[in-house]
Amino acid sequence: MAEDALLAEMRTLRERVAGITGTALASRDGLIVREDTGGVDPDNLAALSATWLALAQRMSNEVGQGLLREAMTRSTAGCVAIYAVGARAVLVLIGDEGLDISSLRRDSRGTLDTIAKLLADSGV
Amino acid sequence: MSTPNQPVATIPTPLRQAFIDCAASRLSGVLRVTGQPGGAFHFSEGKIVAGETPGAPGIEAILLRSKRVDESGWDAAFAAAAATGREMRNELIGRELVGAGELEALLRTTIADAVFAVAYGVVEICRAEAPAAGLLVTLEPGAEAEWLLAETSRRIRVLRSFTDPVFNARARVIAVSGAVRPGLVLGEGRDELAALADGRRTPRDLAFVLGRGVYATMLELGRMQADGLILADSRPPGSPADDEEETPSPAVADDAETPGGLPRRRREHAGQGGRSGGRDLPAAFRLLRLRYGEGTSTGGTG
């Protein structure tokens, strides 16, 4: 089942990158697809992430900086990053203050590709 | 289950040698260590003035999470340091947010914790580089490399002295069900650890949440493991324990139109999608606004 493979992929990324405390995959219209958020409300997270991705992509477009690679908030107690997964989904990563951002940027690329392929294989 | 991937018994040779070489050459620069978790150590005249690693909380996390310094105080000190060019350390002390002696002690232990976290993991390459700008708070005078190596060796020996194998910093820990009776106060910081050991968090994660050193956290967890209060789980993700709690996401169950595909919002769920500004934004945003509205009403005065 694609969702189980999706969750496994998200958990593998959480294990691989120090500081990831939760992950979620949402559709572009803000519905949760799979979540491993560790207590954060997944529905709110999905809705906010889809909205945020739309705004971030519009911002990138507005300033002529090409394809959006990542959008991130950084707060006193951690950070949240989102990544577009193809044209239909968004991956959300929640991290603590020690999130290994260089590992995240390196390792998330493969995860995004795999998730996009899983979604494509499931006929989306 | 406590079958961890045991780290090496001593400090990895490349790291030990790099510290010795940087001290001997009186390096003023950065020693970058690649690996898991890896990190960077800032040297000044051969002494270590700061350490950064994803594997252990830095001084900011230690001060803020432990509530020694409140966030507004930290932000004000940061803004003042940025505006005046003064050292952040002096701003923190000058504003009496933290005492000079306490800050020095915390910086020293934070650096030692960073060295421990890097040494207790996997070390690949150690490379000395030119000094890096942007360090917030540094230890003056810096810590001696020789002391840090001795302290790190001691810490690793202590953790390995437990009868049960001590988990690594990336193993997930979980409180043993029923081991802590309601009303029983464990003390020594164990209550917080037991409450937060939910099977998702690692010792490193717990250290960040509580604003404690990762070594101190692992030491206490090791003792708690010996007392039967917690278990360590080093299994890879996706193992059976991970799947026990899995239930299909409600959103998938309610809204999916194609099994195995992305959930799709049904037409009656879609937002009005107001005119221009909201045209590209997800319909779920409207539901969020409704939810926030409820939150506001419950949190009102009264």
Image: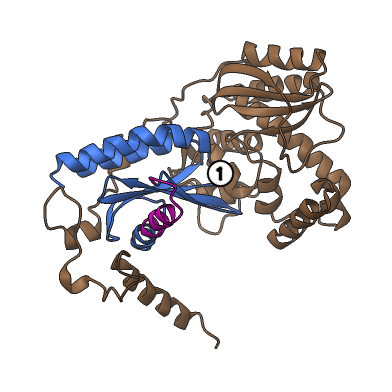
Chain colours: A blue, B brown
Quadrant of the image containing the N terminus of chain B: top left
Of the pair A115 and B177, the residue shown nearer to us? A115
- Looking at the picture, how far across and down is residue B36, in whole percent? 53, 26
Residue B197 within the segment the image draws in magenta: no
Q: Which residue is mark 1?
A: B206
Would you say residue B237 is visible in this rendering? no
Left or right: where A86 falls relative to B134: left
Left or right: where B167 falls relative to B104: left
- Dividing the picture into quadrants, the one containing residue B289 is bottom left
Residue in the image at 81% along x and 13% along y? B24
**Count of numbered marks:** 1
Residue lying at the far bottom in this picture: please name it.
B302
Of the pair B104 and A92, the residue shown nearer to us? A92
Residue B264, above or below B54:
below
Segment colored magenta: A52-67
Q: Element type at marker 1?
A: helix
Residue in the image at 40% along x and 79% along y? B294
Residue B289, above or below B111:
below
